[in-house]
Image (tube, rainbow, N blue to C red):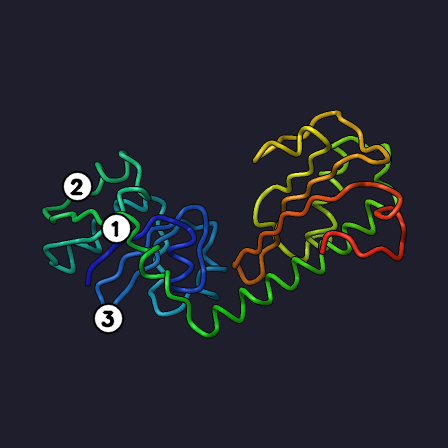
Amino acid sequence: MNYMLNNENAIYYECGYSCDNAIYISFGSEAFFITDGRYTIDAQKNVKFATVVIDGDLYAMAIKIIKKSKIKKMIFDPKEWSVYGLDRLRSGLKVKFEPVVDFSHKRRIVKTKEEIEILSTSAKLGAKAFKQLAKAFRKSGLGKDEYTLTHIARGVLADEGLYGLSFDPIVAIDENASKPHATPTDKKLKKDSLLLVDAGLKYRRYCSDRTRTVSFDKYMMCDTHQSFK
């Protein structure tokens, strides 16, 4: 099966490494990871099961590689590619491009035993991080606005940079907690406020996600109370 990928997560799944400027091409038994010179060292060290190709013009190199293969059909996910990227490839190749929506998602939908273990670890680390965040909010959250609380959440949840975040944390107070994806405001955390935290962290690029809502009352502020479970 011949296919090409442009999405970071899709590429990472195939070869164990990705970056924000890469094209992955597979001809079944042979694969190529194309990127620019900024990622030479990391790509050569981390890419598995694919030949690393460094070039300043990814599309020109992709055309060259596909031409050399003499294939007649290439599968791609139209949700991944820009109009510019597809136009570049189509203009330089006499290949039938077959669109398959969510192509990589379908390949990844059934998790391996190793992936399930990684996801489990990610979830456990997320739960532990929420406990640490509860302690931080009990210690210094009272009177702080959502901007500050969100900043605190980023540091605590990521363990000061040890882990990446699944997405930018959502910390919302009272009526803002009713918004599915609230953005920070100057609303301050008070005693008896309703406090929502929606966040997660990454472990080996697999994301966890937790949402907890609590009342910031005397029980929440007690050091012995287990909150954000």
The residue sitting at 86% across, 37% down in the picture is 142
The residue sitting at 67% across, 47% down in the picture is 212
Q: Secondary structure at mark 2?
A: helix
- Judged by depth in the image, the label closer to the viewer, 3 or 1, is 3
Rounded to the nearest whole Å, what is the CA distance between mark 1 and mark 2?
11 Å
Which quadrant of the view contains residue 2?
Answer: bottom left
| Sequence-earlier tag: 3 or 2 | 3
Residue on which disc 2 sits: 90
Horizontal side of residue 101 vs 207, given as left or right: left
| Sequence-earlier tag: 3 or 1 | 3
Q: Secondary structure at mark 3?
A: loop
Residue on which disc 1 sits: 62
Which class describes the residues within 10 Å of circle 2: few (<14), some (14-19), or many (20+)? some
Q: Secondary structure at mark 1?
A: helix
Q: Position of residue 211 (x, y in %)?
A: 63, 47
- Dot 3 amino acid type: Ser
* Mark drawn on residue 29: 3
The residue sitting at 69% across, 35% down in the picture is 172
Rounded to the nearest whole Å, what is the CA distance between mark 3 and mark 1?
17 Å
Q: Position of residue 183 (x, y in %)?
A: 63, 30
Most distant residue in the bottom direction = 113
Image position of 83 with respect to 224: above or below: above
Q: Position of residue 79 (x, y in %)?
A: 31, 42
- Judged by depth in the image, the label closer to the viewer, 1 or 2, is 2
Horizontal side of residue 51 vs 132, given as left or right: left
